[in-house]
């Protein structure tokens, strides 16, 4: 399939600023990291934003900080998430306490799934972290209730917002609902810049620990943990150039989504609507879902698809891979591709 493109404004901005980095000789720990942090703090309305070299490294660092300073050592993740979320937990030395079930309507756990998992937990709740992934471009619709139960029960909630930079719920930015969140700017994400991540938190103490962690705490020399997981200056500029355009990127993707929505509505095909109930997703994925049948049973002619989120289950939600598919949706997607998708959808349902 064709290449994923960046907006021209982002490329021009990057090109017009890169020479300044070379001239300054400041290739690391310089002003672009600072500028990007400030920009994200302002966009996400978060007290602290710390640039890291990937979402995964940011999550490992957060888990290590919660282990070292807040006595946490057990974690729950969700069944439907990237395999690496599981490896992250062991990398950080955590015990995987449970893998929470997910629902086909959102591809994420509902509040009831979370409540059930907490109620069945036999360990010491003061040791627990719940690491939840936003999937496909929307924030977990139950996140407010989930954040409340976590707060009430003294469970740390980390929002893996790898997919949801730019998405909001009730006007509140993804990544800011729990104790901390992490974005990803990896190549295939909705708002992408090749590599990189940003940790956000409203907890000043955690934010400061993270800032020192990424510098091995070599200036204060108080912490026992830390590692260089920093973002190079050129990459910070790259992410800044793309983040500047994030609203334009989402608007562009929304137009493609509207085309798919129109045809799905007319053919009675169910999909995850990313603009309902005060939710504004970034359309990382356009996901068709089916509650009962496998999608291949009734959309066999739809061949123009992108990778599923996901084609495996880490826990019990084994039906989810079979009951959804994702249509191509990226910035400036060629019209001939979306036309082809529309034709394939129509031809699949023609005889039913
Ligand atoms: C749900 C989820 N979490 C975390 C990650 C990790 O992001 P990164 O590649 O920036 O480490 C990904 C990336 O694929 C992901 O899909």
Image: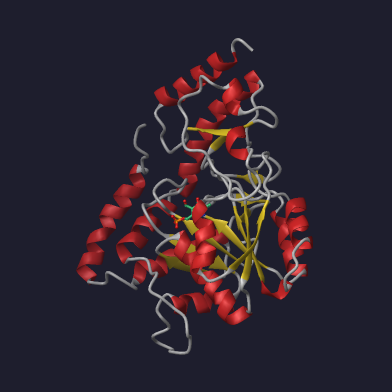
**Closer to the camera in the image, 77 or 219:** 77
In the figure, residue 337 lies in which quadrant?
top left
In the figure, residue 322 lies in which quadrant?
top right
x, y percent for residue 78: 63, 53
- Up the image or down, 293 lies above or below 278; here it is above
x, y percent for residue 308: 52, 38
Report the residue that reaches farthest toward the left: 23
Residue 199 appears in the rendering: no
Quadrant location of the N terminus? Answer: top left
Report the residue that reaches farthest toward the top: 351
Taking 24 as reference, is 318 left or right?
right
In the figure, residue 212 lies in which quadrant?
bottom left
- Up the image or down, 326 lies above or below 202; here it is above
Q: How is the image coloured?
A: secondary structure
In this rendering, the count of numbered labels is: 0
**Closer to the camera in the image, 78 or 43:** 78
Q: Residue at x 63, y 65 (%)?
A: 75
Quadrant location of the C terminus? Answer: top right
x, y percent for residue 185: 43, 54
**Closer to the camera in the image, 269 or 236:** 269
- Up the image or down, 250 lies above or below 206; here it is above
Taking 157 as reference, is 259 left or right?
left
Q: Residue at x 60, y 16 (%)?
A: 349
Residue 212 appears in the rendering: yes
- Up the image or down, 87 lies above or below 28; here it is above
**Closer to the camera in the image, 62 or 167:** 62
């Amino acid at each position: 399939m064709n290449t994923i493109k960046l907006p021209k404004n982002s490329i021009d901005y990057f090109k017009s600023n890169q020479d300044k980095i070379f001239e300054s000789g400041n290739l690391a720990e310089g002003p672009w990291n600072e500028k990007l942090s400030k920009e994200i703090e302002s966009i996400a309305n978060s007290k602290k934003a710390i640039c890291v070299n990937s979402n995964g490294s940011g999550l490992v660092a957060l888990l290590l900080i919660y282990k070292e300073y807040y006595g946490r050592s057990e974690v729950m993740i969700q069944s439907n998430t990237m395999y690496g979320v599981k490896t992250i937990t062991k990398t950080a030395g955590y015990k995987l306490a449970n893998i929470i079930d997910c629902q086909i309507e959102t591809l994420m756990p509902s509040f009831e799934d979370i409540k059930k998992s907490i109620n069945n937990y036999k360990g010491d709740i003061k040791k627990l972290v719940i690491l939840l992934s936003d999937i496909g471009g929307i924030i977990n619709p139950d996140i407010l209730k989930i954040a409340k139960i976590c707060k009430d029960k003294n469970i740390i909630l980390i929002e893996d917002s790898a997919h949801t930079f730019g998405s909001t719920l009730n006007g509140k930015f993804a990544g800011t609902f729990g104790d901390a969140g992490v974005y990803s700017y990896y190549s295939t994400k909705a708002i992408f810049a090749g590599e990189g991540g940003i940790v956000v938190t409203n907890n000043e103490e955690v934010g400061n620990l993270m800032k020192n962690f990424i510098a091995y705490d070599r200036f204060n020399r108080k912490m026992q943990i830390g590692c260089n997981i920093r973002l190079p200056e050129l990459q910070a500029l790259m992410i800044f150039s793309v983040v500047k355009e994030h609203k334009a990127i989402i608007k562009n993707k929304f137009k493609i989504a509207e085309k798919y929505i129109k045809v799905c509505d007319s053919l009675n095909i169910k999909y995850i609507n990313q603009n309902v109930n005060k939710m504004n997703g970034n359309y990382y994925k356009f996901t068709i879902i089916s509650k009962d049948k496998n999608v291949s049973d009734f959309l066999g002619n739809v061949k123009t698809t992108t990778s599923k989120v996901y084609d495996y289950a880490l826990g019990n939600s084994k039906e989810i891979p079979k009951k959804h598919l994702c249509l191509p949706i990226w910035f400036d997607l060629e019209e001939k591709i979306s036309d082809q998708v529309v034709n394939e959808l129509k031809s699949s349902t023609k005889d039913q």
